[in-house]
Image: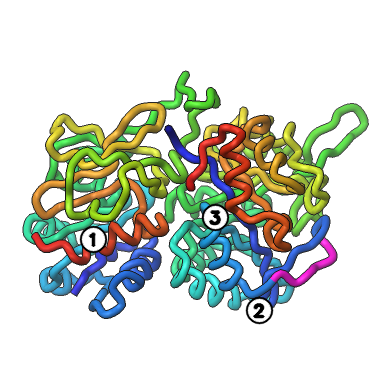
Amino acid sequence: MIAIIDYGMGNLKSVFNAFKQVAPEADIKVTSNPTDIKKAHHVVFPGQGAMPDCIRELDERNLRFSVIEAAKTKPFLGICIGLQMLFNKSEEGNVDGLGLLEGTIKRFNNQNTADESGHKLKIPHMGWNEVSQTNHHPLWQNISNNDRFYFVHSYYLESNDKNIVSAETSYAQKFCCAIAKENIFAVQFHPEKSSIAGLQLIKNFVQWAV
Amino acid sequence: MSLAKRIIPCLDVTDGRVVKGINFLELKDAGDPVEVAKKYNEQGADELAFLDITASSDNRGLILHIIANVAKEVFIPLTVGGGVRTSEDVRNLLNAGADKVSINTSAIVNPDIVYQTSSRFGSQCIVVAIDAKLTVDKNKSFWQVFTHGGRNATGLDAVEWAAKMASLGAGELLITSMDRDGTKKGFDLELIQAISDKVDVPIIASGGVGDLQHLVDGIKKGGADAVLAASIFHFGEYTINEAKAFMKSNHIEIRQ
């Protein structure tokens, strides 16, 4: 079973639809049941909204342990806030993350910052931006380097651990938009909303054996 | 290389069909929503906007059906608006498969809904739609906000209103010029630019697109982050691909 973790935050229907599209035969379940997460062979950790709310909702459903255990043991895909929560700390609400990885989630700064066309930098960073792959990973299979993916976020990851960086994107500054470490792969963009390239990444995840 | 400017075809939906009006009136049939959505997705649309203009409350549930069906086949962001009144309406649309919900009239009736829904579901999924019309009062002219599909004047200044909506948590603003909507004379660039300069969130320009140069102007002159159009695409005058090729030839970053 592929478990999509439901803790009350995010576009779970979109994530479910995208998995169903690439793996129509697979058993895909949107779930907040720890037993399902334990049984699943692949786990998806989506997230939208504000990180303090996401952490609170996760804890209210007693899912923190299940998420940490899955992230340590099986193919695990974090999406958007699902990437951000894996790290130590976020500037958003000054909240602690799950601490599985080293890094801080910071807000884009648009004070005196212009985009490439000279306009004021808009926040959130919203739309299709280029994803430049920085290492070879099974999840990048059949995806062209610098293909565009759909982003919508106001906070980004800053990490000193360069070994986990799997892709970067530019938005006034370069930032890490995908991380990979052992069985964990996590992306700041939304593969479920990124058309052909996004569906390919999800397909690669479904086929990923760690 | 950077963030691409977006092209968003807009599908006005009533009684299960896509329609298109002129100056908010005179509706013409433009097809089945799922088929139209698929066609635009294949042509390279960056997002899709659906506006539920169903007048009777009996048929309100129909939009949930349509969104659910579109979301199963089209994997790009879907924005849905029209008749959204409560937090519950937002939740139902998101559950059906919408990625963003646009709020218009009810934000005026109760501005707090923008704060409530953006706090609960995240700013990324709350779009505030503003219909504005140039209004000349005794001694000043300003863009006035209208509600109820352009029928009711509010007295509010659209630029100030836009700033207020962004401060309450709107993640994006959809700005429609009522003076231009359906006229094919191009966006009201001054309106778009005034709002784009004022707020930090992305702006979608809407109302009045008649040719591809208008799309370029909306971005280059108006400072919009995305351009929305309906009739030039619905009736086959231009494809999204043609629009993108033209924008690219004008040095606008687009997704190919």
* Secondary element at tag 1: helix
* Secondary element at tag 2: helix
Read off the chain for label 2.
B
1 and 3 marks on the same chain = no
Q: Is the residue under label 3 in contact with that under label 1 (CB below 8 Å)?
A: no
Residue marked by disc 2: B59
Which x, y percent locates residue A2? 21, 70
- The quarter in which the C terminus of chain A is drawn is bottom left
Task: Based on the picture, tell me whether residue B188 belongs to the magenta stretch.
Answer: no
User: What span is colored magenta in the figure?
Assistant: B25-30
> Label 3: few (<14), some or many (≥20) within 10 Å?
many
Relative to B173, say whether B198 is above or below: above
Relative to A64, say whether B33 is above or below: below
Q: Which residue occupies the foreground of this view, B107 or B104?
A: B104
Q: Quadrant of residue A15?
A: bottom left
How far is disc 2 from disc 3 in space, using C-alphas? Answer: 28 Å
Residue lying farthest right? B138
Magenta stretch secondary structure, dominant: strand
- The amino acid type, in three-letter code, at marker 2 is Asn
Task: Based on the picture, tell me whether residue B29 belongs to the magenta stretch.
Answer: yes
Residue marked by disc 3: B45
Which x, y percent locates residue B31? 68, 73
- The amino acid type, in three-letter code, at marker 1 is Asn
Which x, y percent locates residue B123? 46, 47
Read off the chain for label 1.
A
Residue A204's tag is 1
Sequence-wise, which precedes: disc 2 or disc 3? 3
- The quarter in which the N terminus of chain A is drawn is bottom left
* Secondary element at tag 3: loop
